[in-house]
Image (cartoon, coloured by chain):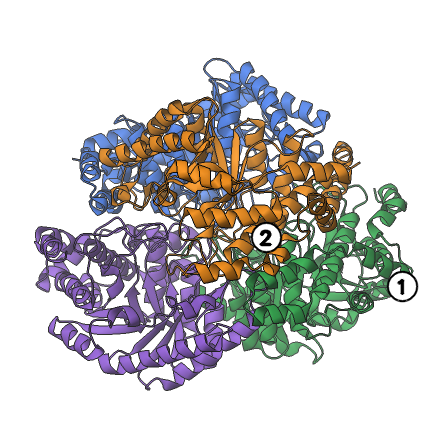
Chain colours: A blue, B green, C purple, D orange
Amino acid sequence: MSLSNARIKALVRRWKIEVPSWAFGDGGTRFKVFRQKGAARNLREKLQDAAIVHQLTGATPSVAVHALWDFADMSPDEARDYARESGLSLGAVNPTLFEQPEYRFGSIGSPEKAARDKALAHLLDCVEIMARVRSRALSVWLADGTNHPGQDDLRARRRRVAEALKIVHDALAPDMTLLLEYKLFEPAFYSTDVPDWGAAYLLCKACGPRASVLVDLGHHAQGVNIEQIVATLADERMLGGFHFNSRKYADDDLTTGSLNPHELFLIFNELVAAGGGKGLYPAAYVIDQSHNVEPKIEAMILSVMNLQAMYARALRVDRAALREAQRRRDVLGAERVLQAAYESDVAPLLAEMRREDGLPPDPFEAYRRSDYARKIERERT
Amino acid sequence: MSLSNARIKALVRRWKIEVPSWAFGDGGTRFKVFRQKGAARNLREKLQDAAIVHQLTGATPSVAVHALWDFADMSPDEARDYARESGLSLGAVNPTLFEQPEYRFGSIGSPEKAARDKALAHLLDCVEIMARVRSRALSVWLADGTNHPGQDDLRARRRRVAEALKIVHDALAPDMTLLLEYKLFEPAFYSTDVPDWGAAYLLCKACGPRASVLVDLGHHAQGVNIEQIVATLADERMLGGFHFNSRKYADDDLTTGSLNPHELFLIFNELVAAGGGKGLYPAAYVIDQSHNVEPKIEAMILSVMNLQAMYARALRVDRAALREAQRRRDVLGAERVLQAAYESDVAPLLAEMRREDGLPPDPFEAYRRSDYARKIERERT
Amino acid sequence: MSLSNARIKALVRRWKIEVPSWAFGDGGTRFKVFRQKGAARNLREKLQDAAIVHQLTGATPSVAVHALWDFADMSPDEARDYARESGLSLGAVNPTLFEQPEYRFGSIGSPEKAARDKALAHLLDCVEIMARVRSRALSVWLADGTNHPGQDDLRARRRRVAEALKIVHDALAPDMTLLLEYKLFEPAFYSTDVPDWGAAYLLCKACGPRASVLVDLGHHAQGVNIEQIVATLADERMLGGFHFNSRKYADDDLTTGSLNPHELFLIFNELVAAGGGKGLYPAAYVIDQSHNVEPKIEAMILSVMNLQAMYARALRVDRAALREAQRRRDVLGAERVLQAAYESDVAPLLAEMRREDGLPPDPFEAYRRSDYARKIERERT
Amino acid sequence: MSLSNARIKALVRRWKIEVPSWAFGDGGTRFKVFRQKGAARNLREKLQDAAIVHQLTGATPSVAVHALWDFADMSPDEARDYARESGLSLGAVNPTLFEQPEYRFGSIGSPEKAARDKALAHLLDCVEIMARVRSRALSVWLADGTNHPGQDDLRARRRRVAEALKIVHDALAPDMTLLLEYKLFEPAFYSTDVPDWGAAYLLCKACGPRASVLVDLGHHAQGVNIEQIVATLADERMLGGFHFNSRKYADDDLTTGSLNPHELFLIFNELVAAGGGKGLYPAAYVIDQSHNVEPKIEAMILSVMNLQAMYARALRVDRAALREAQRRRDVLGAERVLQAAYESDVAPLLAEMRREDGLPPDPFEAYRRSDYARKIERERT
């Protein structure tokens, strides 16, 4: 038997998704950043946009921040207070370790001591910021790697990364976590210092108990079974969190759920299974996207809705029936149990849940009916 | 029997490679453009850098230009004259159809008439520029595509592209060619309007006799046999040219020959085979790279040297022995014929060729010994 | 506005899917063929199994046959009559060009004249068989290719294939078609003679009006946009048909719709769009799967149900709303139109359709409740 | 400065490569096993073929065996003695855990206790065989996995595998090792129980000190940097060995070095670097190939020669110059150090080494001139 609708609503309602400040500002490809009218120009505006997403969905009370980008105009203390006034809190602090010329050959993986020192100092600054903004997660993505065979010693790079991460880890307060992201390629094209989950796992283990792995859905080679990685990391208690997005070939950072939503469902299926009946496996659930041709706030709301729907579908899986089919080696019966949940229409249930919570049943349409978009287009020029 | 060394030298000597103006200026990834000291800031400086490459290699007398980028400070007439004074000519004209806000949804594939009109006008301007700079190749790469399923009608996009290309094709003088590039993905992530060689072929056929397909080595899905595409296009007399570079996963635009050089050799093997004993199949051979962490002029010289070496190796293939092994179904014997040529050391032969031509035997080292790099670092600040 | 439910039911009802005889017999991987109790051992038993699929789904009145495998024990005339008695007809005739030792280096692409002659004779035999069994489609898949660079001349192979296909094409009666399949790799690993849709397209064009391209969903490189290929081929009126199945990495031949069903939906969306309001684009719709761990008849029924559901979803797309969203450049609005159709629950509608047709509302469950599986397990030993 | 030629010869001479018994028998794809005249039909004949490879190359004194296949006609004791008489020893023992019907749902990962018990018993038998044949390596590849989402519990499968491997590990004598292979896909298509190096690493760590990871060059997703995995495993002292072969897209099992030999060079470059100046990192170096269209013994000799050449090239890397270029951030200078070694002609040096050892300078040609092939074609019918 599946969970009751009431239980599903309760679990979905309880689940909080973090949105990234950077998705509200202009982003793009290496060929072009298309400016959008009304795109947020600073943290204040990003928090305003995040607040509207939360007001409409009730699901996104925290905002991940990017250390250098977000605290240019606003101190961490101001940011924390402004977030609180907006009904939000600040979430994961993301160091920015790829934009300055010193990082040409990497940050903490660089062969240049000056680069490593600068990067390490920035990471430790981020820990300071975390304390100030009451954030509990340091979310580390390294652009480090090489473009040419021979450019650097691959083992030396790994050791440098390990050494710095250990220092950062040890500087964290006991209730803080270090989330380490891996990525197959880009912006380094020949080798990436943390290329896959195995590499991230080993680095985290070497750090200590406060480090765990963050899975970004766009960071894998084609053909990789991501839900199996998720299951493995959860089984090892080393799954720290997610960066949600969607992709076709590379790290496309498209709206979550827009391509191969079935894969997303299978990931949630593992997360629910690993949650042991108490909802999702506990981790940092963060959206990480880049909106080029579509309106940013709409895309964020849609992503949140897609995530909630996928979670609800995973909760609809009749786990007793699934286990029974597995027990009987009923391969297709088991698949049909998943299929029934995946294909079930959860929109009415989620609309009901939102209504009960005083939220618009379709937050996307509610946003469109609001005049927020027109307002920011007018005001932010 | 392989060709004689004299014949190989003669053929390599005769082969001219085009260098791209844009590789001498700063480029980068979506995360960061690293500024290099001494990087060319305008067409004049790019032509200076191209001239030094040609002086040292004797192999790169022409320079591909990017329409909007290169004629900002210099008119086509001035550019043509300045190139000539520098011992160069201008080569393929590349329209720039992805940077302006109108192109948010594409250029000639856009659903917006204003965008299509602007793009078509720019393409026709490029034909004008070609006449002015004595260029015979219009090299068209479209960034057009979609990021979301449903965003646009895929068949309509294709027809719009076909319609515009036909107009441009018909505007070309009889000795001009339209080279159409295809690309799997990026910057559009869900669909690309000209995604593969088949799509490019059909569009070219619909244009007429002056259109043919351009192969960029970084624009294929993983696992695709590029040399077979080259052989097929050559067999159909629809192979218009190349954009040379190297890649590991996506369109990495690394130095030609730096990764999987054996694949490059196999491509040259097909080009020599299709050349019917008279050297390479006639086409536009152009380098297209983006140098992020390595010095740009050095990288260009190295790419030219790698290309010449690969051509020389392909000329070393004992084609009679290969045919004979194939005739006897001697699979490994045939492979060994290719292997012998691939593994043969062609550096001495190419050094000799260069000496005979009054060139430095190792252009890369000669460049390093020159004070050109220091000079431009000093002067271009 | 979407189509009415009545219209959707009428269109789905009218759509006929062909099942492959070979999926009812034992198949496997290169490591192991697992024998299934009750698996069909000859064409008679395959037709019995196909008949039960058609009885339960009402959707699969024809059966694709494999020339050598299926006519070992039964002549074409007997097969045709037995099929008719079973309420079926025979569909596409598939030549078998890869099993005999002569085909070591290929069939019609082989450098060995004896192999080519044998293969051509077999293909012409297949045309004879088509006449006898009243089949209108010759469905050609070539295992031809090479494993080693240099093993054969790639252009020569292509010409040999073209020459033979032309002869076969010209031997077809006017109402017969030649469907040409392409495949990236396997069983040849270095090069495949018809590796992609572009290659298949050119070969078909060279044959004449009765040749068109067949798309097998498992035959593409990773990251390729298959629905765009479908749209292109349909637009060129060169889409001849499909081999349906599902895959994760290579040509896995899994149950249709079991992985990335959203991609299948997007393909149907293009087929409905290309159908111009009259249902699917007209083509040969054939399932091609290999069932290793799951019961074969169940897997086939499930595949048929998944295909019908996907077609129904594609018919649910509100095309006027989609066009309007596209017209307004409402990227996310357009995506939501597709999403609404994809996520809509079509099971009740299809159950209703089946009931109206005197069919079981859930053919999969009906099969399980029948004693057919037990019967064949008992009888076929 | 590079190593002296004398030193390079000494190191290459000392390096021993293991050949697989199974490559001398007939193999194939799922579509067809092409029988070769003279292919070995049993272990005796496989050992005869391996002996000729060793006689001609002097490099392959041991033969990996496949437990069920190889001891059908010959007991382990007889095999050990026969190998010794042939100038060989038996190497890694490979369990055969995929052919029997019990393994339909896996072996030690199966949900069926009977299958797990049978598989575990077979693994423990293999340990017995190892003692008998004086083998020190148990080389475990699992075909285990699932084809359908939901078919089994992914975490449960992992735990079952871990449990059995631990028992096997603990049954090993102190000087024995368990080598665990990973593989992305095939023959399971949805999930594989040991899909990547990270999964293999964790399982080995859980086993204990005698378990380490085996890298098969054909078992990775496209785009993965294999040399970096090798460097990481070596750095962690968890690199147990290799299965050498070559591939274009999947696990093609082609002749080692035939495709992308540069990647193989970069792997050897890491192995030499990790060897700390004393030659290669110590591990089990085993060839694992399947020869379909080429003569098997020739293909094996060519693979051995390609491996030796690649090792020699890696030894030619001027490591001091490489380090110096890296120290100066001379990206292209560093790459040129590798390139110089990769492009250097090592054939004369290896021919000299072989002559000094009383071996034919070109073992491949020597084999062709011998009448061994004709002899076995005559005798094995």
Residue B310, image x and y in percent?
71, 59
Q: Which mark is residue B85?
A: 1
Furthest residue in direction front, as rendered:
D85
Disc 2 to disc 1, how far (Cα)? 54 Å
Pair 2/1: label in front: 2
Within 10 Å of disc 1 (Cα), the crowding (few <14, some 14-19, many 20+) is: few
Residue named by callout 2: D302
Q: Position of residue D251 (x, y in %)?
A: 46, 49
Choose between A59 and C131: the one closer to the eye. Answer: C131
Give the residue type that dot 2 points to. Answer: Leu
Choose between D282 and D208: the one closer to the eye.
Answer: D282
Residue A345 in the figure: left or right of residue B89:
left
Query: In the rendered structure, the residue with mark 2 lies on which chain?
Result: D
Tell me which corner region of the image, top left, top right, bottom left or bottom right, holds residue C39.
bottom left
Count of numbered labels shown in the rendering:
2
Q: What residue sits 84% from the left and 52% below the top?
A: B363
Report the side of A289 relative to A225 (left or right).
right
Q: For mark 2, give the secondary structure.
A: helix
In the image: residue C369, left or right of residue C28 = left
On screen, A282 above or below B30? above
Query: Which element carries disc 1, helix, strand or loop?
Result: helix
* Residue type of the residue flagged with mark 1: Glu
Point out residue C226 in the picture as x, y percentages from the top left corner.
42, 60
**Whole-percent x and y of residue B280?**
71, 69
